[in-house]
Amino acid sequence: MLNTGPPNDHLIVRSSGPYNAEPPLGRLRASMRTAQRDLYVRNHGNVPHLDAANHRLRVVGRVSTPLDLSMADLRGKFSETTVTAVMQCAGNRRADMQSVRPTSGDPWAPGAIGNAAWTGVALAEVLRAAGVTNDPSLHVAFEACDEVDMPDEGRFTYGASIPVVKALSPEVLLAYAVNGEPLAPEHGFPLRVVVPGFAGVRSPKWLSTVTVQDRPSDNHMQQRDYKLLPPDVTAETVDWDKGMTIYEMPLNAAICEPALHAKLRAGPSIIRGYAVATAREVARVDVSSDGGRTWVQAVLDHDVQAPWSWTFWSAEIDLAVGKHELIARAWDSAGQTQPSLPDDTWNFKGYLSAAWHRVRVSVS
Ligand SMILES: Nc1nc2c(c(=O)[nH]1)N[C@H]1C(S)=C(S)[C@@H](COP(=O)(O)O)O[C@H]1N2
Ligand SMILES: [Mo]
């Protein structure tokens, strides 16, 4: 299998075959919109190098008029839309869970996330042009062009699905550009799905086919991966049909600065990070420098024009000489917050790691 990763050598490589990498957190926090070259890369197989001039998108299944579109058709026949949205892996922050007990998967720090302005056409408009059957129980399945090779599964083409109700929501895009640039090969050139608020796995890159169907995708990615399982289930005992399919991502927050094990000077220090909530808004972020005994409220920086964006936050904390555990936790507009420890939600796949983020620093 071809596993040529991009030359984004400022990214921290978590696996080289397939190529998976995330940006350093200080760099991630430097800009509300993540530059394409700073966006984490999560591949399951090869990076196809496709020719936009010959690329086709097929829309088939429970539609009255199947479509077979070129990239020029997509750009010419549908209205161009831009949505600023978070892309986040279901395994973001998995390293915290792995410090409790081993899990499968790459040891992501909190950098398997980014926030970018995606441009393309609304999937809803394309589905309507195809005459999608009006039935809210349907699913929209995506097929890509990359080949995944898994020990227990053999070779298959990447695919995933989302419920039709989400597929018809205006924020879901078939995107060909990010931050005004064409997608890079590793981010899905020439066409990818962007499902704001959902785990990245539901946003296939290198999209070739959209199928409206009466059940979720049969693909391995949908059926035997990316499901949330109870803490007592292991790789040996797993019954995938009993797992919860991961669609919407939970409330989460991370400290981006200072970095883990940073050496700081005594006195006021600025703590900075991001918070994300999908169904609701981030309403508050608390920061502690004493392991959670006392807290201060961070100042929030919302992008009011962009409801699918993340929220940046910062807090000034006075640090005395010694060792400190900095903690951040977010609250949403329903008054829900994050679990305090990764132990609370540990699962053998290491998904949805969203405990209070803890960063140890020393102050002199
Ligand atoms: N075709 C295809 N699409 C894919 C994947 C993949 O391996 N192949 N990985 C998915 C996962 S798990 C994530 S988190 C996002 C990551 O998107 P990015 O690499 O552009 O950041 O892409 C998703 N789409
Ligand atoms: Mo992912």
Image (cartoon, helix red, strand yellow):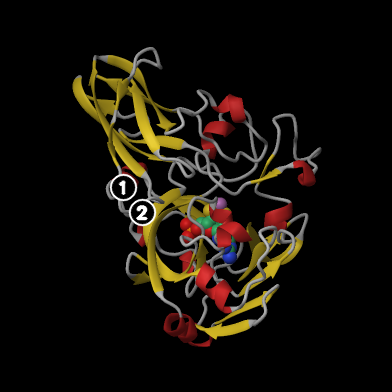
Query: Is residue 19 visible in the rendered structure shown here?
Result: no
Q: Residues within 10 Å of mark 1 (few under 14, many from 20)?
A: some
Which residue is located at x 52 percent, y 49 percent?
Answer: 89
Residue at numbered disc 2: 10
Which residue is located at x 28 percent, y 50 percent?
Answer: 31
Which residue is located at x 27 percent, y 47 percent?
Answer: 30
For the residue marked with disc 2, what is the amino acid?
His
- Tell me the number on the disc at residue 27: 1
* Dot 2: element: loop
Task: Establish if 363 lies above or below 187.
Answer: above
Q: x, y (%) of residue 150? A: 71, 58
- The single residue placed furthest to the top in the displayed view is 293
The answer to whether 317 appears left or right of 219 in the picture is: left
- Please identify the quarter of the rendering in which residue 281 is found: top left
Of residues 239 and 308, the one nearer the viewer is: 308
> Marks 2 and 1, Cα distance to the nearest angstrom?
10 Å
- Tell me the number on the disc at residue 314: none
* Dot 1: element: helix
Query: Is residue 335 visible in the rendered structure shown here?
Result: yes
Q: Are marks 2 and 1 in contact (CB under 8 Å)?
A: yes
- Please identify the quarter of the rendering in which residue 350 is found: top right
The answer to whether 264 appears left or right of 358 in the picture is: left
Q: Residues within 10 Å of mark 2 (few under 14, many from 20)?
A: few
